[in-house]
Image: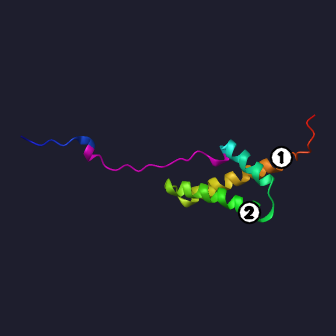
Amino acid sequence: MAHNRLPLVEWPPVECQIVPFPTKNRLGKIRRTAEILGGRHGKGADQYWQQVIGGMRSQMEKAGLPTSVIETELQGFADAVLARLSSAQPYDGDAA
């Protein structure tokens, strides 16, 4: 009896490109990060920012994204957070 191989097993490897969800469009994460950063100053703000960016970088590295894409995505996120912080109105306690 002849042993037939399935053609699926013999497919050549195909190159693919991972396209991440743009970090500048992660509105919930941008809002939350800006909210937390708005309430921290100095070393506390720096540590939180490094934690957020480090976590995002790690996720993208594990997904196999090239360094250039990671840097572009992180810069887009940073720009979006900064824009959110710049447009935030300080809370003055007035509910009216």
Q: Specify the principal SS of the magenta part.
A: loop
Observer-nearest of 37 and 20? 37
Q: Earlier in the sequence, mark 2 or mark 1?
A: 2
| Residue 28 position in % (x across, y down) | 69, 42
Q: Nearer the viewer, residue 53 or 48?
A: 48
Q: Residue at x 81, y 60 (%)?
A: 41
Question: Which residue was labeled with disc 2?
Answer: 46
What distance separates the C-alpha of mark 2 from that of mark 1?
20 Å
Q: Which secondary structure, mark 2?
A: helix
The percent coordinates of residue 47 (x first, y second) are 71, 62
Residue lying furthest top in this view? 96
Residue lying at 73% horizontally and 53% vertically, measured from the top left: 79
- Residue closest to the eye, 35 or 3: 35
Q: Which mark is residue 14?
A: none
Q: Nearer the observer, disc 2 or disc 1?
A: 2
Q: Where is residue 78 in the image (x, y as percent from the top left)?
A: 71, 54
Location of mark 1 (residue)? 87
Local crowd at mark 1 within 10 Å, few (<14), some, or many (≥20)? few
Q: Quadrant of the N terminus?
A: top left
Counting the numbered discs, the total is 2
The reply to whether callout 2 and callout 1 are in contact (CB within 8 Å) is: no
The stretch of residues the image draws in magenta is 9-24
